[in-house]
């Protein structure tokens, strides 16, 4: 009986000594959670006003909220009297080990966040990234999904996508369509130029301003290579690309202008006797 009474007294003394710390820790926890809630409302409103994607705002808000709550937990643990130095060191070592194991994945994650914030490209843009040309279908945290021109799906890690030169073909209102047409040497350039320009202007989607350009690019062994440069809006690019070739071929054929092809002329001379 005396043993139990002594233990009860010890427990009561322990509770009395810990009571102020526990009460203080609980108050700090409750007040801290309330303050974090208020802070997060301002942060979410600020991120929304900044023009970020709707999918990015909750993601960044959740990261900030987690960081603030972790700081609050460490503060409460310190008030109670829990030794946090060793815990922080252990947590840091674990984080370092996990970071080294997931180094590549974390790199893709960081790159994905940068893409979402700075928007070098967005969903729906026509891009050329690391030699992959296509339309961006989705920007994820770790990967960018691109639909190629041949309708194949390319999943590119964000770390790779942002590690080289990126060309956003949709960043401007219109694009120049680079085409080449081979003209025989014996054909009249002015006539061919006029035919090609007429064919270009009859192609749906070709812009009149800037005006299309048809000029000689270089002289090959078998033909004259013409630089044909119409302009089109981004969404009309491929219609103009294929439509121009089709109309030019039809116009040249109708006018009797042969398409250049490799050939060899053989001349036979009779030796004088």
Image: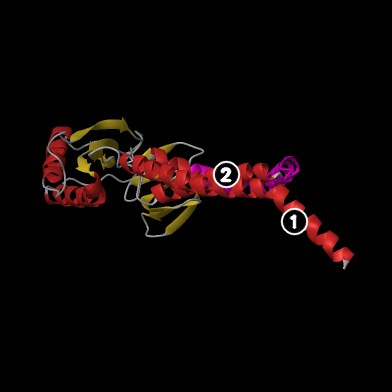
Residue drawn at the location 37% of the way across and 51% of the way down:
136
Residue drawn at the location 72% of the way across and 46% of the way down:
82
Q: Position of residue 271 (x, y in %)?
A: 36, 35
Q: Nearer the viewer, residue 16 or 241?
A: 16
Residue 83 sits inside the magenta stretch = yes
Q: Earlier in the sequence, mark 1 or mark 2?
A: 1
The image shows residue 154, relative to residue 213, as above or below, that is below
Q: Nearer the viewer, mark 1 or mark 2?
A: 1
Kindly identify which numbered label has been placed on residue 72. 2
- Name the image quarter holding the C terminus: top left
In the image, the segment drawn in magenta is: 82-111
Does residue 48 appear left or right of residue 141 in this picture?
left
Give the SS element for disc 2: helix
Q: Residues within 10 Å of mark 2 (few under 14, many from 20)?
A: some
The image shows residue 273, relative to residue 44, as above or below, that is above
Give the color scheme: rainbow, by chain, secondary structure or one colour.
secondary structure
Q: Nearer the viewer, residue 247 or 99?
A: 99
Give the SS element for disc 1: helix
Q: Position of residue 196 (x, y in %)?
A: 16, 41
Does residue 169 appear left or right of residue 98 in this picture?
left
How would you classify the magenta stretch by its main secondary structure? helix
Q: Nearer the viewer, residue 41 or 33?
A: 33
> For the view shown, which residue lies furthest in the bottom direction?
1
Residue drawn at the location 29% of the way across and 42% of the way down:
170
Q: Dot 1 corresponds to which residue? A: 12
Q: Position of residue 118 (x, y in %)?
A: 40, 38
Does residue 126 appear in this view? yes
């Amino acid at each position: 009986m005396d043993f139990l009474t002594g233990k009860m007294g010890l427990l009561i003394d322990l509770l009395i000594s810990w009571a102020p710390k526990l009460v203080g820790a609980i108050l700090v926890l409750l007040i801290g959670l309330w303050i974090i809630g208020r802070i997060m409302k301002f942060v979410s409103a600020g991120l929304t006003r900044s023009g970020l994607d709707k999918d990015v705002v909750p993601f960044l808000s959740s990261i900030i909220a987690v960081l603030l709550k972790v700081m609050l937990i460490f503060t409460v643990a310190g008030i109670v009297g829990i030794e946090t130095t060793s815990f922080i060191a252990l947590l840091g070592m674990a984080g370092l080990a996990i970071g080294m194991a997931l180094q590549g994945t974390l790199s893709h994650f960081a790159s994905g966040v940068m893409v979402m914030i700075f928007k070098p490209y967005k969903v729906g843009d026509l891009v050329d990234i690391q030699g992959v040309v296509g339309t961006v279908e989705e920007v994820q945290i770790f990967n960018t999904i691109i639909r190629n021109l041949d309708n194949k799906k390319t999943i590119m890690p964000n770390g790779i996508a942002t590690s080289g030169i990126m060309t956003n073909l949709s960043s401007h209102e219109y694009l120049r369509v680079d085409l080449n047409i081979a003209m025989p040497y014996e054909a009249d350039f002015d006539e061919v130029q006029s035919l090609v320009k007429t064919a270009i202007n009859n192609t749906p989607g070709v812009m009149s301003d800037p005006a299309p350009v048809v000029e000689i690019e270089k002289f090959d062994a078998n033909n004259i290579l013409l630089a044909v440069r119409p302009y089109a809006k981004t969404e009309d690019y491929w219609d103009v690309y294929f439509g121009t070739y089709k109309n030019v071929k039809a116009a040249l054929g109708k006018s009797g202008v042969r398409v250049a092809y490799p050939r060899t002329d053989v001349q036979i001379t009779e030796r004088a006797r």
